[in-house]
Image: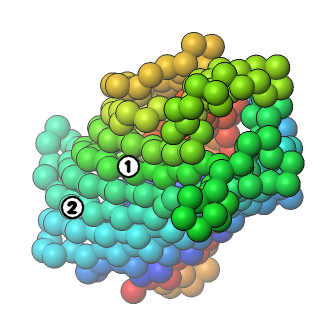
Amino acid sequence: MDRRNSPPYALFLLALSVFSPIPSFADVKTFQQTFYAPDYDQGFLLVDYHYFDESLDVLDYSSKLSSTFKPESASSIYLGIGYRFFEKGLISYQRERSKGKITRDREPFLLESKVDGDRLGVRWQIGERFNFDWSLELAYLTREQPEVAINCYEFQGSVFGAGTDSTLSFADPITDAPLPRLESDAQQSTWAATLFANHELFDRLNVTHHVLIKQSDIEINTRSPLFDIESPFLLNSSFGGRKLSEIIASFKQDLPQQAPWKETSLRYGVAGVLLLSDRWIANVQFALIKVKRNGYQRVQGNPNYKSNTILSTSLWYTPMQNVSLYVEGMVTQHYLLGIDELTYNQRTSRFFEHPFAQIKTGFVLGF
């Protein structure tokens, strides 16, 4: 957005999402992809909040999932700050805190988890070439899902853990306290480079192209006392008509792989910002994403999606100086593919079969 024609965006952003099973992508990066040059003098502070529960599932996404797990509620908050350390350079930092609940029709009936993340970016205005205004951003992102402990888990008719109906339970050899059936944690680290090219088609329309390259290292760790069983007597014992060793092997195949893998994505997007009047602005963005994974062990019969398409549109209203309100809608072809790398693994790939939609509203106070 050309600063000469734009309303004053900058200091404070609060957005409420009304459809986001796993909120993860309304942040500093998305804000910069939408508006090439928002009207702030020295910097900005961004606060973004999402919330979802079953009553807001307007597209009935949950019922389309071929999984025992269904999203129940989720929320996330992003705190971002950007500072123009000199005329052509901007440094930004963002803190993410997300949490969610999912339900299951068998043990465990409810699971809760959270994700913490940090993002640091530096953006530099390169200058004008070929009638385009160019800029480049380099960013580093880390995200972590702290350990989740599942005390009781039903798999293929057998119940393992500390539940009252457990087929097989485990206890600490020293304290005799029940041990969790399964423990899991995850980490992501990402390097990203984005090249922006902006040009003004006419006085009220700005178009910004961006090319984003990301490489992410992803590691998911799962642990269970089941995996430590070495006794031939137990491994050959029958549970529900099957040997325990066969059940353990099948269960391991149903979990994310233990070895880390890399995901590299290439995204091209184009956004148009149209100044409808002194108070109204319309924005439309279209993006294509291609994904490549190295070291990822595909499970036979499971889908392996490698591309995504994104279409979003927003309408902004400025009722008074330094205050802007907006509503935005977004549709993706394959859920969060190429957007949130931590969500894709052997256990969750089936969630990416269906289109995903989000509607959010928010406001900006500028200085």
Residue occupying image coordinates x 85% and y 54%:
164
Question: CB under 8 Å between callouts 1 and 2?
Answer: no
Give, as a three-letter code, the residue at label 1.
Gln
Looking at the rendered image, the disc whose residue lies closer to the viewer, 1 or 2, is 1
Tell me if 324 is positioned left or right of 356 in this view: left
Tell me if 146 is positioned left or right of 216 in this view: right
Give, as a three-letter code, the residue at label 2.
Val
The location of residue 81, given as percent across then percent down, is 35, 75
Which is more toward the observer, 179 or 106? 179
Residue occupying image coordinates x 40% and y 79%:
45
* Mark 2 closeness class: few <14, some 14–19, many ≥20 residues within 10 Å: some
Identify the residue under disc 2: 122
Residue occupying image coordinates x 54% and y 81%:
323
Identify the mark at residue 188; answer none if there is no mark: 1
Which is more toward the observer, 98 or 211? 98
Which is more toward the observer, 312 or 15? 15
The location of residue 263, given as percent across then percent down, is 36, 33
Quadrant (top left/top right/bottom left/bottom right) for the C terminus: bottom left
SS assignment at label 2: strand
Tell me if 308 is positioned left or right of 101 in this view: left
Quadrant (top left/top right/bottom left/bottom right) for the N terminus: bottom left
